[in-house]
Image (spheres, coloured by chain):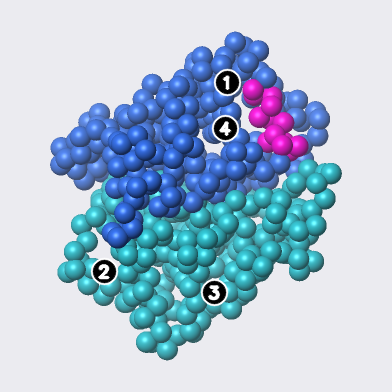
Chain colours: A cyan, B blue
């Protein structure tokens, strides 16, 4: 299969760097084709701005969505954006590996999302009307591809447990897993979290690699997170609220998973 | 009072630009001192990297937390970071205004957080032991200051309601409101969301400004979000899990608010 690793850490000689190298070696040995986008090494431009829309006429206000759509359709996007989109279209599965900084992605990775996720590519896809609110949340350009977050954290597993002070990990990651991955159509695998990273000695690294290897070996076999599809009947359209008989009276993020009724 | 506006939008001639100008004029007319950090105009460097740690010896791996701490303590941080930290210390309240891109901040603003929130300044503050897990979540350098998110969105209010497909707004914003604002000690005000931004004509803009003015006028009077303080007895230490008798058997993000039992 074809695997794309989107990787964001400033130091190759880090736990993250070692895990990236391990994943590439393991996947390659298993016969997969692997591409890596090493955002720091690529000096990825993080801030979406008018330079991302060649031909933008500055006599009118810069609208990110409108301009993104224009250059996407015209085929005049910056080369770095086009290259990343081509990698996404090529891949059967995409792994996003990063340290959790302030409960989200490092800025350089957020800037990859902001810029690569063009209008017409990752959003603004499909019919947009009062009866069909776009091909999104389970449909879209990434449909049929799998995605997984590999996330390192200084905190303990209990801090990210269901009653942990940081918020349950899948809730903290909801804006990414549901909003960045499921939205354009990815099938989202459970995350692979690595906690307490400052306590990683050689033994622990070996354990982490063994667990990671299992996740990689089963990437196309494991059960994904069962997010509800927007257009499969569970949501009212265009209000996009979960129908009242599903998970009735609840309003937590868990209601957006099938099986939570 | 002293108000700091952290602002991230690439186009001054936008709804966001107009709201920024409105807020500055309104607050100034009310007698407040106002500073604005206009991140796009400042060409803010988004990616935290070794250049943020002058004197870093590249013969050892770059550890973001360790190096951030070193230069913070030594007073040798880059000038742009020091300047923003000084503004935070100066302010009585901080407003973060941005368009919600992919259910989070634009990368340039995330990069402001990643770089300005130094170790020893916004994290790594206070005793860290098995009995006291830092001055954080309600304590820390920003204690006594208020903060509020002003967020524009293309989507509808119902899409971000308690049962909306995007997730309830306060849950989507939890990594920011709880993880970026409450963590270093801010008192967090309810967000001021602006929905359906593409449908903003002059009448609607006037309504938005009137509502925003009320929020600004009451910034120091309104009730904040009642996040539970980490070190006030509600959490086990060091597991940092909510004690079993509080909001028993629940594991949604709402349990971290007082009054949810």
Given the image, what chain letter belongs to the residue carrying mark 2?
A: A
Tell me the SS state at disc 4. strand
Marks 3 and 2, how far apart in space? Answer: 25 Å
Residue A31 in the image: above or below residue A187: below
Nearest to viewer (mark 3 / mark 2): 2
Residue B119 in percent (x, y) is at: 33, 40
Q: Residue furthest left?
A: B130
Q: Magenta part of the protein: which range?
A: B12-24
Q: Earlier in the sequence, mark 3 or mark 2?
A: 3
The image quarter containing residue B30 is top right
Nearest to viewer (mark 2 / mark 1): 1
Q: Which residue is mark 2?
A: A208
Magenta-colored stretch includes residue B17: yes
Mark sitting on residue A145: 3
Magenta-colored stretch includes residue B161: no
Q: Residue furthest bottom?
A: A31
Badge 3 and badge 2 both on one subunit: yes
Q: Residues within 10 Å of mark 4 (few under 14, many from 20)?
A: some
Q: Which residue is mark 1?
A: B34
Residue B175 in percent (x, y) is at: 44, 44
Q: Which residue is mark 4?
A: B37
Residue B31 in the image: above or below residue A239: above
Badge 4 and badge 1 both on one subunit: yes
Q: Can residue B8 be seen in the rendering of this structure?
A: no
């Amino acid at each position: 299969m074809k695997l794309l690793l989107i990787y964001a850490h400033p130091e190759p000689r880090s736990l993250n760097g070692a895990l990236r190298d391990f994943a590439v070696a393991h996947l390659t040995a298993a016969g997969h084709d692997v591409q890596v986008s090493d955002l720091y090494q690529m000096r990825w431009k993080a801030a979406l701005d008018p330079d991302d829309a060649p031909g933008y006429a500055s006599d009118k206000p810069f609208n990110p969505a409108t301009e993104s759509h224009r250059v996407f359709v015209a085929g005049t996007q910056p080369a770095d954006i086009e290259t990343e989109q081509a990698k996404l279209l090529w891949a059967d599965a995409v792994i996003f590996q990063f340290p959790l900084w302030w409960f989200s992605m490092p800025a350089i990775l957020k800037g990859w999302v902001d810029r690569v996720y063009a209008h017409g590519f990752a959003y603004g896809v499909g019919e947009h009307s009062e009866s069909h609110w776009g091909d999104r949340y389970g449909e879209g350009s990434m449909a049929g591809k799998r995605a997984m977050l590999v996330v390192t954290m200084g905190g303990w597993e209990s801090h990210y447990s269901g009653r942990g002070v940081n918020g349950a990990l899948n809730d903290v990651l909801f804006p990414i897993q549901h909003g960045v991955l499921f939205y354009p159509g990815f099938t989202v695998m459970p995350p692979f979290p690595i906690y307490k990273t400052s306590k990683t000695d050689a033994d622990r690294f070996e354990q982490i690699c063994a667990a990671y290897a299992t996740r990689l070996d089963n990437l196309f076999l494991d059960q994904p997170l069962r997010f509800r599809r927007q257009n499969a009947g569970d949501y009212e359209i265009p209000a996009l609220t979960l129908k009242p008989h599903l998970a009735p009276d609840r309003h937590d993020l868990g209601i957006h998973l099938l099986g939570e009724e």
